[in-house]
Image (cartoon, rainbow, N blue to C red):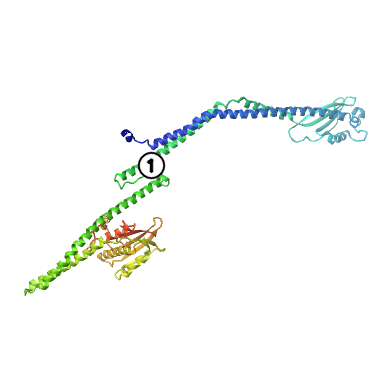
Amino acid sequence: MKLDAERRPVPLQLKLTVGLVLLAALPVLASVYFIGELGRAAANVNAGEAAERVAILERAIQTNQKLVFEAKRLHGEIANRLASRRGMLALDPAEMGGLLVDTFGLDASLELEAVLRQPAQAGLRRLEILRSDGTLFASAERPPLDGERVDTHVEVPLGTAGSQLHLTFDVFDANKEIQALKDTIDKMKLIMLYKTALPDGYANGFVVIIAISSLAAAALGVWAARFATRRIDALVTTARRVSEGHVDARVELPGSSRDEMAQLGSAFNAMLDNLDETRRQIEYLQRMGVWQDVARRLAHEIKNPLTPIQLAVQECVTQYKGDDPRFKRLLADTGEIVMEEIEALRRLVDTFRTLGALPKVEAAPIALAEVIEDLRLDPAVAPRLTLVPPEVPVTVRADKLLLKRVLANLVENGMQAGQELGNDGGVTVGWSEDARAERVRITVDDCGKGVDAAAREKIFEPYVTTKSTGTGLGLAIARKIAIEHGGELAVAPDPAPTGGARFVVSLPLR
């Protein structure tokens, strides 16, 4: 059991790498098996189609051959029919006795042209009458038709004196078409030879292409897996460091700042920032809780003896009836000093009582401008206060009395800081809304000497002050109130535009 518990889990990167390699190998293995089946199926289909086409082409060749035979027979019939016609026999040179005009007084060539124009002689392109010695006696022809055509010749005797009737027919060139059909048949028969499978070169080439593509995909997947798991590991490492107490640890993810992992890293860092701020606020509230308990106890312990001490001193001063003027004056001075210190202690007790009895926050939606405008009701503050409101009114969720107390304390401190530097102590209060963060930001700028970087955190601790007067509880109380509102009070790292310090109060919106 102990050994099992101590075993480290299999890294995610290894899991992804093995998975990607297996996924990349599957297409190769499948292609090796199916390529033969696919090739045989394709070859059988092609062979079947080729056989059907060969049969059709052979029938077409037979049909063309029959057409050629019929055309030749038809040409012979036409030639015999024309040679036996009375009008054509009249054109026999031997019968005409050398005359060039037939019995109707027409020229022999014109008679031949008339024959060519007859519809029954379709396809007849040229007619010639040859004498018995082979010389041309008369002829007629018409232009050849368009397309791939050839001339066929038929000769028949004309009369009994040895004359010849020579006919030329314009026919379609069937030999080229028949040869083209034969070439196609030869190609189809080559396809029929591959009935079992595709050529080995095709199958091997297909497998090689699939293998290369799969290996490339696997390599890319492995790289992507390493890249992704490295960034996830950075998140895990940072989370472990934070759990070990390194609250300042932050994650840095390589790669584009716009992808999902980078956004996750940014959100993770923002969460750590919020946790760190919350932790500091909780620690501050815990310290303030201790101070509040001490303040309540001190206020109770100090307040009780003050009144008897005051009465006893007053009694000593009033009951002296001696005539020693020096002692009487010393007694009076001592009484005044004691009375002043008792009054100071009373003020300190009141401050302790205030710190120890801060009311709970009762937040409600309020108009921020109304709270800040109420600061002008103090005659000492009104001439030194400058307000910079936003264009759109802002509503916050806060306790109006406590928020006013925070702002009044900051304005009073700012006035005192400027007056200690020798100016009139002007203070500028501005506020603006951050809708994305759902917060409002209130700035209080003074004309004092500012706050050193080393004192920015300590200045909010109880009984820490940079002024010549004061108890150092005002800023501590103000920050506690801001935190209990769900906000924060801090000193800006940069000086205010007025040259002094800038205190920033952040509060939740409505």
Pointer 1 local density, CA inside 10 Å: few below 14, some 14–19, many at least 20: some
The foreground one among 134 and 502 is: 502
Camera-side residue of 137 and 458: 458
Residue 186 lies, with reference to residue 436, above or below; the image says above
Residue 215 is at least partly visible in this image: no
- The answer to which image quadrant residue 471 occupies is bottom left
To which quarter of the image does residue 504 belong?
bottom left
Across and down, in percent, residue 483 comes to 31, 57
Looking at the image, can residue 287 be seen? yes
Is residue 248 left or right of 46 when viewed as pictured? left
Which quadrant would the C terminus be assigned to in this image?
A: bottom left
Q: Amino acid at mark 1?
A: Ile
Q: Is residue 135 left or right of residue 65?
A: right
Residue at 78% across / 30% down in the picture?
A: 151
Quadrant where the image shows the N terminus: top left
Name the residue that disc number 1 marks.
Answer: 232
Secondary structure state at the residue bearing disc 1: helix
**Disc count in the image?**
1
Counting from the top left corner in percent of width and height, residue 301 is at 18, 61
Q: Measured from the top left, where is residue 79 in percent x and y? A: 84, 29
